[in-house]
């Protein structure tokens, strides 16, 4: 009967063996498997991040151009207002000269 008892593991030995197997074999294998599965996702995410950066740069350029265009339009409007003012003055002078 003592021979049969020697073949059995104690609960403590079982847990220690399981913990050792988990640390040395199971976790590294799972980590490798997850890394292999996640690598394409990481690459795609990096690609998307680069595209977003390109889009941000393009938006900044468009924004800058729009600001410059608006400033140019306001400048032209002011020139036209001044020109209209001058023309109105000339019209008044002509009216007073004819009167």
Image: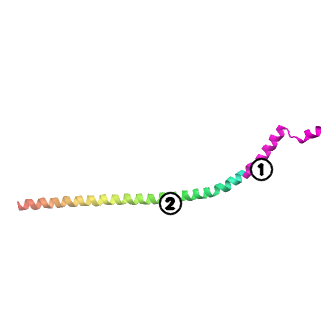
> Crowdedness of circle 1 by 10 Å Cα count: few (<14), some, many (20+)?
few
- Of the numbered discs 2 and 1, the one sitting upstream in the chain is 1
Residue labelled with disc 2: 54
Does the segment drawn in magenta span residue 4?
yes
> Crowdedness of circle 2 by 10 Å Cα count: few (<14), some, many (20+)?
few
The residue segment tinted magenta is: 1-29
Quarter of the picture containing the N terminus is top right
Q: Residue at x 51, y 58 (%)?
A: 53
Quadrant of residue 46 within the rendered picture: bottom right
Quadrant of residue 64 within the rendered picture: bottom left
The prevailing secondary structure element of the residues shown in magenta is helix
Q: Looking at this rendering, what residue extends furthest in the left direction?
A: 99
Foreground residue, 39 or 60? Answer: 39
Counting the numbered discs, the total is 2
Residue labelled with disc 1: 25
Q: Secondary structure at mark 2?
A: helix
Residue 63 lies left or right of residue 99; in this view the side is right
Quadrant of residue 42 within the rendered picture: bottom right
Q: Secondary structure at mark 1?
A: helix
Whether 30 is drawn above or below 58: the answer is above
Q: In the image, residue 3 lies at what x, y percent?
A: 94, 40
């Amino acid at each position: 009967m003592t021979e049969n008892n020697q073949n059995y593991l104690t609960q403590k030995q079982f847990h220690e063996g399981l913990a050792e197997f988990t640390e040395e074999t199971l976790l590294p294998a799972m980590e490798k498997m997850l890394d292999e599965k996640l690598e394409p996702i990481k690459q795609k995410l990096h690609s998307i991040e680069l595209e977003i950066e390109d889009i941000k740069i393009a938006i900044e350029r468009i924004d800058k151009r729009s600001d410059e265009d608006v400033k140019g339009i306001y400048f032209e409007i002011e020139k036209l207002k001044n020109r209209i003012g001058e023309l109105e003055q000339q019209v008044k002078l002509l009216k007073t000269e004819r009167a």
